[in-house]
Image (tube, rainbow, N blue to C red):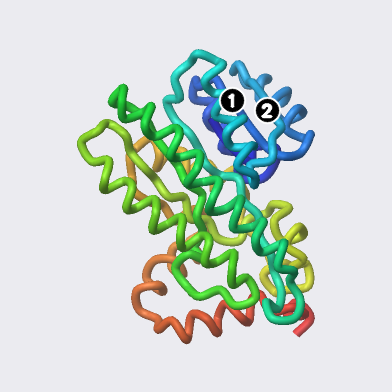
Amino acid sequence: MVTGASSGIGYELAREFARNGFDLLIAAEDPGIMDAAKNIENLGASVLPFQVDLATYEGVEALYGKIKSTERLVDAIAINAGVGVGGDFARATSLQAELDLINLNVTSSVHLAKRVVKDMVDRGHGRILFTSSIAATMPAPFEAVYGASKAFLLSFSEALGNELKGTGVTVTALMPGATETNFFHRASMDDTKVGASQKDDPAEVARDGFEALMAGEDKVIAGSFKNKLQGGLGSRILPKTVKAELHRKQAEPGSANR
């Protein structure tokens, strides 16, 4: 099962599962999930699409109900649905947009995991992938709430993975950098340096995530060598104040033209 699968990393994750012999239940809030299902079916998988708003309690419960209605076991789940909000927290971004971000990125991820993980533990097998970000390793000025949400997911993933040792259930955090998806446009970040920059291929990111999930790794920094340097070595050596300034230069509104 893959959430946020109508486009971007989620869509490519679903394609990875299909290429590797999985049947799929895929979910997203937009009607593009129907076209995504048709395209993924061309890879030989059985694909069940479900359009649902996971930023609501009712949406997550409806998705879990859909899982149960299939009367099939979830061998692996990619909890990937997420959104970004870019801009000046004090003067530009709306409170509702920030709260919606928390509801989708954080609350729905915990909610869905709470429902699915018990089933996996009860039968002694399962794989869970959370899409975090290398933004989880640093303060994220002008994406302050988004960065915090991804830090939450990384911490949650690593803690849950430790709790589940010996149960047959593994937990993996996928940590991409800037990826060529609709993320930056939706987050109103087209005029930022990172928004205008060359980005990683979502298919490559998804492949890294899928392989790490199948190997039972606790986390993977996906995509380019730059990501691995930034999210790995850089996160351990550079002070948080320096990392915050580096992120600011990439995400500050108007920075694409400087």
Q: Position of residue 58 (x, y in %)?
A: 63, 37
Determine contact: label 2, label 1, CB under 8 Å.
yes
Using the image, determine if residue 217 lies above or below residue 243. Answer: above
Foreground residue among 206 and 57 = 57
* Residue in view at x 26 percent, y 45 percent: 163
**Residue type at numbered disc 2:** Phe
254 relative to 141 in the view: left or right: right
Residue receiving disc 2: 50
SS label for mark 1: strand
Mark 1, residues whose alpha carbon is within 10 Å: few (<14), some, or many (≥20)?
A: many
Residue 24, picture quadrant: top right
Q: Position of residue 40 (x, y in %)?
A: 66, 25
Closer to the chain start, of discs 2 and 1, is: 1
User: Considering only vertical position in the picture, is 26 above or below 70?
Assistant: below
C-alpha separation, residue under disc 2 versus residue under disc 1 = 7 Å
Q: Is residue 54 left or right of residue 225?
A: right
Q: Residue at x 79, y 34 (%)?
A: 31
Q: Which residue is mark 1?
A: 25
The percent coordinates of residue 105 (x first, y second) are 57, 53
Location of residue 68 in the rendering, given as x and y in whole percent from the top left corner: 52, 20
Secondary structure under badge 2? Answer: strand
Q: Nearer the viewer, residue 249 or 55?
A: 55
Q: Where is 107 relative to 123, above or below? A: below
**Left or right side of 228 for 255:** right
For image coordinates 55% across by 46% down, the residue present is: 108
Amino acid identity at mark 1: Leu
